[in-house]
Image: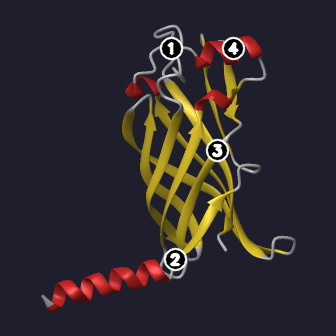
């Protein structure tokens, strides 16, 4: 009983040291690139995101949730955007969001280098590790709060999530990039 209480208190202490951050939707744009018949790569991004991050840099731990509005897809081509929102690609009527939930953070010294988590797309959830290519936190003089930013990337097969449009003419591999900035909660 004493051991269980001690573990619970340590867990609460770890959570108490974490700082909460809100995703800045004006500076967070998940983007991707995917094969177009082996000839070129189509690139797109999502214009609307929300979510939060909890991070304890001293304890080298954290978690995150990034919610992507799939109807905000933007290829820079209106006809392609409309097609991508349809049933055979993102099916936004049935699946209005894609969600990345980071469950554990990996640090090298003070630098965040990876996030292990899960991507939910088209109602299917699969493990996905984000490689953190760039990470920085600063005190924003205008907001008078800490702002953290990162550039993260990963690769996955869209077919693992049931996104099978164009197979086999279009390869299933997708490169994901997430530029994210988050503002410390007040």
Closer to us: 143 or 35: 143
Closer to us: 49 or 77: 49
> Cα distance, mark 4 to mark 3?
20 Å
Q: Residue at x 40, y 31 (%)?
A: 123
> Cα distance, mark 3 to mark 1?
21 Å
Q: Residue 83: percent from the left, percent from the top?
A: 63, 12
> Cα distance, mark 2 to mark 1?
40 Å
Q: Is residue 73 left or right of residue 144?
A: left
Q: Which residue is mark 1?
A: 87
Q: Badges 3 and 1: C-beta atoms under 8 Å apart?
A: no
Q: Is tag 3's residue or tag 1's residue first in the polypeptide sequence? A: 3
Q: Residue 31: percent from the left, percent from the top?
A: 66, 36
> Cα distance, mark 4 to mark 1?
13 Å
Q: Is tag 4's residue or tag 3's residue first in the polypeptide sequence? A: 3
Single out the mark in the foreground, 4 or 3: 3
Q: Is tag 2's residue or tag 1's residue first in the polypeptide sequence? A: 2
Q: Vertically, is 113 above or below 120?
A: below
Q: Which residue is mark 3?
A: 49
Q: Residue 56: percent from the left, percent from the top?
A: 52, 76
Secondary structure at badge 4 equals helix
Residue 18: mark in rendering: 2
Neighbours of disc 2 within 10 Å: few (<14), some (14-19), many (20+)? some
Q: Which residue is mark 4?
A: 80
Q: Residue at x 69, y 33 (%)?
A: 45
> Cα distance, mark 3 to mark 2?
22 Å
Secondary structure at badge 3 equals strand
Neighbours of disc 4 within 10 Å: few (<14), some (14-19), many (20+)? few
Neighbours of disc 3 within 10 Å: few (<14), some (14-19), many (20+)? many
Q: Residue 105: percent from the left, percent from the top?
A: 47, 64
Q: Is residue 123 left or right of residue 149?
A: left
């Amino acid at each position: 009983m004493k051991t269980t209480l001690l573990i619970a208190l340590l867990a609460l202490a770890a959570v108490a040291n974490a700082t909460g951050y809100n995703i800045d939707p004006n500076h967070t744009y998940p983007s991707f690139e995917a094969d177009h018949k082996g000839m070129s790569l189509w690139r797109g991004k999502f214009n609307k995101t929300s979510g939060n991050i909890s991070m304890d840099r001293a304890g080298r731990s954290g978690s995150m949730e990034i919610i992507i509005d799939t109807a905000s897809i933007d290829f820079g081509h209106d006809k392609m955007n409309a097609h991508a929102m349809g049933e055979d690609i993102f099916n936004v009527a049935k699946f209005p969001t894609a969600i990345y939930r980071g469950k554990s953070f990996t640090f090298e010294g003070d630098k965040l280098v990876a996030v292990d988590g899960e991507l939910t797309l088209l109602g299917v959830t699969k493990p996905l590790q984000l490689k953190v290519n760039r990470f920085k936190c600063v005190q924003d003089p205008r907001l008078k709060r800490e702002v953290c930013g990162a550039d993260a990337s990963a690769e996955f097969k869209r077919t693992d999530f049931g996104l099978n449009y164009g197979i086999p003419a279009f390869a299933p591999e997708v490169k994901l990039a997430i530029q994210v900035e988050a503002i410390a909660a007040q």
